Image (tube, rainbow, N blue to C red):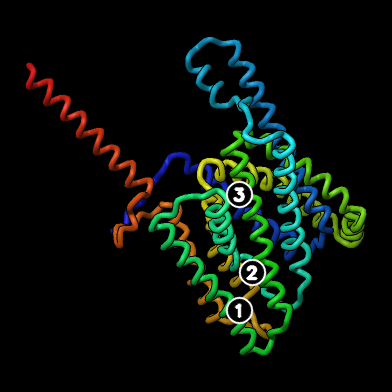
Amino acid sequence: MIKIGLRNNLLYPLLLIIFTFFRRILSVVISELLKFESSLSFLTFLMFFSEFITGLIIYIYQLKFIKHNKKTNSKKSRIKYLVLNNKMSYHDSKFKIYLLIFIATYFDFVEFILTSYYFPQFENISKSLIIRLGSALTLSSFILYYFLLKIEIYNHHKFSIIIIFVCLLLIIILEISFNIIYQTLNENHFIIIFLIIISLFFIGFQDNIEKYLLEFNFINPFEMLMIEGLFGIILTFIYSFIENPIDNIIEFYQKEKTIKIIYLIICLTLFIILSGGRNSYRILTNRLYSPMTKAIADSFLDPLLILYYFFMGIDFKFKNEKNILYFISNLILSLIILFGGIVYSELLVIYHFNLEKNTHYEVARRASDVESISIVDNIEMLSSNL
């Protein structure tokens, strides 16, 4: 038997899924349809700029909200003030907190460099490979969360992680095998697979650092997002001395028609908005749930992206011909990974092999049963006294 385990605040991972999906689609449109080969520092700047602006706006709004509630004496306002006020004593020194935020930002910066700039430069490499190997982020987040923050592991966690690991291994084996069959395998395939997994470990480190700061130092998530954006802008500015971001923009402006330039401006504006929304709900999901739930939300709609890449003719081709077996194999494995992620995040609760034990749904149900029994006992006791 399988039950749906609905929980409070599911809106946060849902919005993270939506923002992540549409930003990925938008990135494909910018690179594949508009053919805009932007410089690394330009896209990175837009991403960190969106983090800084989004974090700054919401953080200022929260401060004004708190200031307003200080002037009121209602009980409801005092509760909201306690919820939003983070002027609490930190577990670590401010220097360590800022250092950890900088390290998290640096991991994000390096991962963005690898995935957005260097990976596409490898020839004859599947363009959806980063998406298909995305489950490595869930595994890396789990390993780091277990060893660094000492989480408890239950049966449904073990079940899900084993499924995800086996499917990830099969995806790598399939990728190498098909390239061997079609004689397209070269050393770049091994390099890119290794770098993708390493880059996803960087994001796992980032998510766990943020989780540590949120859980043990009670830092405001939007204050952290703002500081990360500021550190990212500084790193991007330093990198711009190596690669000038203006050259690619001027080249695109000179050779393309006006209508295409307008489309690009619209897409880049949407990229900033979607990046701000994605990173906001990324941190909120991490705060309320865990780095693994955030990673699962990141890859939740990957099967749809795989379908998009295949039917648009962007990927899953050998010698300019679509390979249906290659496509279907990866699609099935991505769906199995999605199932494992849903079980891990307890959206589905499986009542076999004791997998339901210690899930949020079962714990809440047992607590409700105990409360109901207690109420009935009290009523019976009162009745007997009467």
What residue is at 77 percent from the left and 59 percent from the top?
A: 113
Mark 3 burial class by Cα count in 10 Å: few <14, some 14-19, many 20+: many
Of badges 3 and 1, the one in the foreground is 3
Q: Which label sits on residue 208?
A: 3
Q: Earlier in the sequence, mark 2 or mark 1?
A: 2
Q: Quadrant of residue 280?
A: top right
Task: Rate crowding at label 1 as few (under 14), some (14 to 19) or many (20 or more) other CA atoms within 10 Å.
Answer: some
Q: Position of residue 260 (x, y in %)?
A: 80, 57
Q: Residue at x 87, y 59 (%)?
A: 252
Q: CA distance from mark 3 to mark 1?
A: 30 Å
Label 3 and label 2: CA atoms lie apart by 26 Å
What residue is drawn where x is 56% and y is 39%?
A: 215
Q: Is residue 381 left or right of residue 285?
A: left
The circle drawn on residue 128 is 2
Nearer the observer, 57 or 249:
57
Q: Position of residue 141 (x, y in %)?
A: 57, 56
Q: Quadrant of residue 312?
A: bottom right
The residue carrying pointer 2 sits among few (fewer than 14), some (14 to 19) or many (20 or more) residues within 10 Å by Cα, namely: some
Residue 156 versus residue 361 in the image, above or below: below
Of 285 and 251, the residue lying toward us: 285
Which label sits on residue 102? Answer: none
Q: Amino acid at mark 3?
A: Asn
Q: What amino acid does circle 2 point to?
A: Ser
Q: Residue drawn 81% across and 62% down? A: 37
Q: Which residue is mark 1?
A: 175
